[in-house]
Amino acid sequence: MSEGEERSGAPWRQWGTDLDAQSIAQMREACALPVAVRGALMPDAHVGYGLPIGGVLATDGAVIPYAVGVDIACRVMLSVLDLPVAWLRDRPERLAHAIEQETRFGVGVEFKHPRDHEVMEEDWSVSPVTQANRDKAWRQLGTSGSGNHFVEFGVLTIEKGGFGLEPGEHLALLSHSGSRGTGAAVCDYYSKAAQKKRPGHGRLAWLKLKEPEGHEYWAAMELMGRYASANHACIHRHLVAHLGAAVRWQLENHHNFAWQETYDGREVVVHRKGATPAGRDVLGFIPGSMATPGFVVRGRGNAAALDSAAHGAGRVMSRTQAKKSLDWKAAHRVLAERGVRLLSAGLDEVPMVYKDIHAVMAAQADLVEPLARFDPKLVKMAPAGERPED
C-alpha cells in the first residue's frame, strides 16, 4: 500500500506500486468531482472509461453509470463438484463437450430456446431500456459473451479444510461473465442522460439518486445484478446437469456495481468498477488468468480501501498491443508448461497480457486473506476476432 494520495478534492489511497500513470490520473480526476467523498485504487488497476478498472469511488447521493461500468454486475461463480479430479486427465472431452453444449461465447450470442429462470418473471418495466431489451436478455440468459469472460474447469486446492470441504484437491467449475447486451444498453442510455444533465464531465457525469433518472438507473442496475447472477446460475446448473454431477459448495461475488454503504457515520454510494467487495469475513474469489491461479479469499474489512480488493490480476498491455507484440507459439508454450488445455480464446487474453497474480495478492495482504487456490486446466473464452464486452 502506498502513502495516502492527497490531491485537490476527495482523498484516495493506492494499493500496489506498479500502476500506470493513466490509471492514477483517472482516479485523481474522479476524486476531484464535486460529489466525490473518498476513493481507493486496487493493485490490479488499469485504464478504463471514466473511472479506471480497479477503481473504487464513494460519492454523496450520486451514481456514475460509467463508474459502475458497461458490463453491469459482472461476476465470478465457483462450483465445487462431486466428481473426481482425475476427470481432468481421464475425461477431458466430456468436460469440454459440456462447456460447448451448455453455454455460448461471442458478441450478441443467444439461445434458440431460452433458459428458464425466475428473474425473467420480475418487473422489467423499471426502465425503458430493460423493458425494451427483456426478450433479448431472456435469449442471452446462460451465455458467456466475449472479452475476458470465460468458463473453465480446474483444481481447487484447500490446505486446511473449510466451507464443509475436506483438505486436498477438488474438481471445480469457474465462470466469469455479466449482464450481457442489456447491461451495456443500460450503461449507455443513462450515461448519456447524465452527460446531458452535467455537461463537461464526460464519462464521469453523474445522476443524483433523488432525480428521476438516478432512481430509474438504480432500479435498472439492481435488476441487472439479479440478471447477471441468474446468468451464472443457468451456466452452472446446465453444465452440472450435463455431467450428471452435483454441487458440493458454491461461491459467487460481483463487481461493476454500486452499493449504498456507511463509512465514518456517513451513507455514501460506493462504486466498485473491477473491484471485489471485501468486507470483514466476506468470502470472494479473485481469478488470475487462463494459466495462473485464482484464490478464494476472506475480506479483512479495510475501511481505508472502502472494504474492497482487486477483482483479478489486471492487464499490463492493451488488446491492440497484445495482438501486435505477442504470438500463439509462445502462448501455447506457457499453457503447456502449466498443463492447461485451451478450447478457444483471442491472443489478447493470453497469460502474458496480465500482471503477476502473486504480486497482486501480496500487494493487498491487508485487504484479503487467501483461503484456497484454483488452478485452471480446461479453459474456453470467445474465439479470436470477437469484440470485447468487458
Image: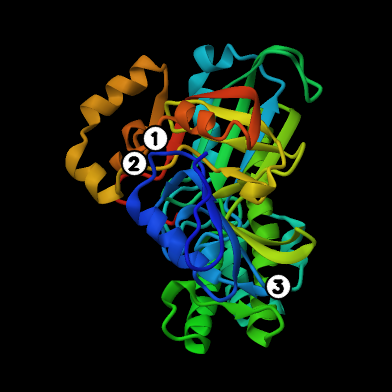
- Disc 3 from disc 2: Cα separation: 35 Å
Q: Nearer the viewer, mark 3 or mark 2?
A: 2
Q: Is residue 218 left or right of residue 365?
A: right
User: Residue 63, relative to residue 340: is it above or below?
Assistant: below
Nearer the observer, 360 or 241: 360
Which residue position holds label 1?
Answer: 355
Q: Sort mark 2 into few (<14), some (14-19) or many (20+) by Cα contacts within 10 Å.
A: many
- CB atoms of marks 2 and 1 within 8 Å: yes
Q: SS class of the residue under badge 3?
A: helix
Quarter assignment of residue 314: top left
Looking at the image, do the residues carrying marks 1 and 3 touch, with CB atoms under 8 Å apart?
no
Place of residue 200 in the rendered image (x, y in percent of width and height, measured from the top left): 41, 83
Identify the residue position indicated by label 3 in the image.
Answer: 219
Q: Identify the disc placed on residue 59.
A: none
Q: Identify the image quadrant of residue 340.
A: top left
Give the answer, above or below, for where 19 lies relative to 379: below
Residue at the (55%, 78%) spot, across then down: 190
Mark 2 and mark 1: Cα distance apart in space: 6 Å
The numbered mark, 2 or 1, whose residue comes first in the sequence reads: 2
Q: Residues within 10 Å of mark 1 (few under 14, many from 20)?
A: many
Inspect this view and state whether residue 108 appears. Answer: no
Label 3 with label 2: CB-CB less than 8 Å: no
Which residue is label 2 attached to?
A: 316
Is the residue 157 above or below the residue 126 in the image? above
Dot 2: element = loop
